[in-house]
Amino acid sequence: MRKDGGRRNRRGGRRRRMREEKEKEEKKEKEEKRLERETRKKRMRRRRLKKEEQWLEEKKREKEEK
């Protein structure tokens, strides 16, 4: 009879732990990059809208001046 109750090497060893840790780290990095992309997109969109608004205001003023 084995002391571990017949469960030999079910969890895997060092390699598996290292691989899982690496995958976890990669997943975290991927998520960070995704969030970064999203925030960059939102910033660019806000900036574009702001510029567009300014341009429209400018057009309006030019029209009123004429």
Image: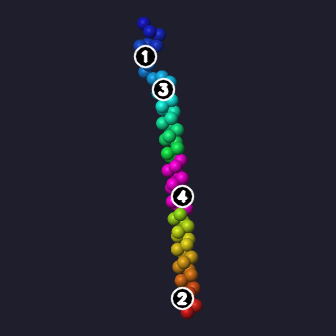
Image quarter hosting the C terminus: bottom right
Which residue does the numbered mark 4 point to in the structure image?
40
| Dot 4: element | helix
Against 11, residue 60 (above or below) is: below
Task: Give the farthest residue toward the bottom.
Answer: 66
* Residue type of the residue flagged with mark 4: Arg
How would you rate the neighbour count of disc 3 (Cα within 10 Å): few for under 14, some for 14-19, many for 20 or more?
few
Image quarter hosting the N terminus: top left
The CA span between labels 1 and 4 is 49 Å
Q: Residue at x 53, y 63 (%)?
A: 44
Q: Residue at x 55, y 67 (%)?
A: 47
| Dot 1: element | loop
* Residue type of the residue flagged with mark 1: Arg
Magenta segment boundaries in residue numbering = 32-43
Q: Which mark is residue 8?
A: 1
Circle nearer the viewer, 1 or 4: 4
Tags 1 and 4 in contact by the CB under 8 Å rule?
A: no
Q: Earlier in the sequence, mark 3 or mark 2?
A: 3
Which residue does the numbered mark 3 point to in the structure image?
15
The CA span between labels 4 and 2 is 35 Å
Q: Earlier in the sequence, mark 1 or mark 3?
A: 1
Circle nearer the viewer, 3 or 2: 3
Q: Earlier in the sequence, mark 4 or mark 2?
A: 4
* Residue type of the residue flagged with mark 3: Arg
